[in-house]
Image (tube, helix red, strand yellow):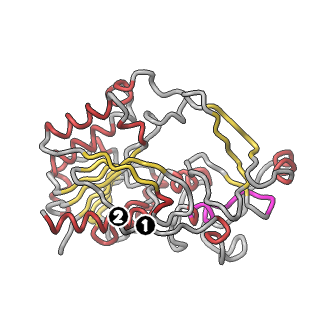
């Protein structure tokens, strides 16, 4: 079956890994991230520009009819982790510049008319009244909108991650469950520091280094409150026998046995990225690309479900 997939807001390519060579086109406009994506997916027709400037016609002219549109618009306007998110949920979607990128995804679905679309984001995106608004927006262009809530760790990813995948089909991963590795198992087998891509020591100041040395498993160097006044922690020393916590773009973790931060490669392992997937840009950009991705192992199982659904259409 010849399937053509478009990845919008392609980022570092976690979602694209899942769909493999069926991905024919992608949109990403951050220069360092573009370099990452182009290196890892050389066969894809990449549009390195603002999604608002990419029309459905331009994509159709480049790669032909698109069967599936996938993508994860920025979650910052919606997540409770963002203390500066707008108070009115509708403003997050309609007046926040980043939030409106969700509408650009919907626009491309309308212009391309794929058989299936899958949009990933934080669960707060579909909290009421936003859930009803999104269903109405998709209904206007002729599509259903099912809210599929998935926990990545149930499908083999060695870190916790709870996300919603909005789609016109129900994403049923029953039977695809897989026991996730603990931190120690996930990090096993890496070469010494400096001998693999993105596997270099992350330098920290003398004072922080001293504090890191005093942390036990599960203890954190920093804590902060989110927009709901809940406490979150960062720079946590990971427990070797447990799953890693949710990985965000700004997340940094301390190695369970060594007094140092995890490398980008180690953090990528905890998100199920393969070791041959190379990240470009500065160190913060590399960590962002890892933490903002759809975990590839989960993406592969979503892709399997989508391919089954395509055969039923």
Say what secondary structure mark 1 lies in. Answer: loop
Farthest residue toward the front?
175
Q: Is residue 253 magenta?
A: no
C-alpha separation, residue under disc 2 versus residue under disc 1: 7 Å
Placement of the C terminus among the 4 image quadrants: bottom left
**Depth check: 5 or 139 in front?**
139
Image: 2 above or below 231: below
Instruction: Measuring from the top left, give residue 103's x and y in whole percent.
Output: 27, 37
Image: 20 above or below 170: below
Rendered image quadrant of residue 25: bottom left
Give the residue number, with chain letter if any, for mark 2. 174
Query: In the image, what residue occupies the spot 76% across and 44% down?
Result: 221
Say what secondary structure mark 2 lies in. Answer: loop
Q: In this view, does 18 lie to the left or right of 179?
A: left
Query: In the image, what residue occupies the spot 87% across and 50% down?
Result: 210
Instruction: Check whether the beta carbons of the residues at disc 2 and disc 1 lie within 8 A of each other.
Output: yes
Instruction: Measuring from the top left, give residue 78's x and y in whole percent.
Output: 43, 34
**Depth check: 144 or 90 in front?**
144
Q: Is residue 261 magenta?
A: yes
Rendered image quadrant of residue 186: bottom right
All told, the count of numbered labels is: 2
Instruction: Measuring from the top left, give residue 187's x and y in whole percent.
Output: 65, 70
Image: 101 above or below 282: above
Give the residue number, with chain letter if any, for mark 1. 177
Q: Is residue 148 left or right of residue 137?
A: right
**Depth check: 205 or 142 in front?**
142
Query: In the image, what residue occupies the spot 54% across and 54% down?
Result: 160
Q: In this view, does 72 lie to the left or right of 169?
A: right
Placement of the N terminus among the 4 image quadrants: bottom left
| Mark 1 residue crowding within 10 angstroms, few (<14) / some (14–19) / many (20+) | some
Q: Is residue 25 left or right of residue 144?
A: right
- Residue range (magenta): 258-268
């Amino acid at each position: 079956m010849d399937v053509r997939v478009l990845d919008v807001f392609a980022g570092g390519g976690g979602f694209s890994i899942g769909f493999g060579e069926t991905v024919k086109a992608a949109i990403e406009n951050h220069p360092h991230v573009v370099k990452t994506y182009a290196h890892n997916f050389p066969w894809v027709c990449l549009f390195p520009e603002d999604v608002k400037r990419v029309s459905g016609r331009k994509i159709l002219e480049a790669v032909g009819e698109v069967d599936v549109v996938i993508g994860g618009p920025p979650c910052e306007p919606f997540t409770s982790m963002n203390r500066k998110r707008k108070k009115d949920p509708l403003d997050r979607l309609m007046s926040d510049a980043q939030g409106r990128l969700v509408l650009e995804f919907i626009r491309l679905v309308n212009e391309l008319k794929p058989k299936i679309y899958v949009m990933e984001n934080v669960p707060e995106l579909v909290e009421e009244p936003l859930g009803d608004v999104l269903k109405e927006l998709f209904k206007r262009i002729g599509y259903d909108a099912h809210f599929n809530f998935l926990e990545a760790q149930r499908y083999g990813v060695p870190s916790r991650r709870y996300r919603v995948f909005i789609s016109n089909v129900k994403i049923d991963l029953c039977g695809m469950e897989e026991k996730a590795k603990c931190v120690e198992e996930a990090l096993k087998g890496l070469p010494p520091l400096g001998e693999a891509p993105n596997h270099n020591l992350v330098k920290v100041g003398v004072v922080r280094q001293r504090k890191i040395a005093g942390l036990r498993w599960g203890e954190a160097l920093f804590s902060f409150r989110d927009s709901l006044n809940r406490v979150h922690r960062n720079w946590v020393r990971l427990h070797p026998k447990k799953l890693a916590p949710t990985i965000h773009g700004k997340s940094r973790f301390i190695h369970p046995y060594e007094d140092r931060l995890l490398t980008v490669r180690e953090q990528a392992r905890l998100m199920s990225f393969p070791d041959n997937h190379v990240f470009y840009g500065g160190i913060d950009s590399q960590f962002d690309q890892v933490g903002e991705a759809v975990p590839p192992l989960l993406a592969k199982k979503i892709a399997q479900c989508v391919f089954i659904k395509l055969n039923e259409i």
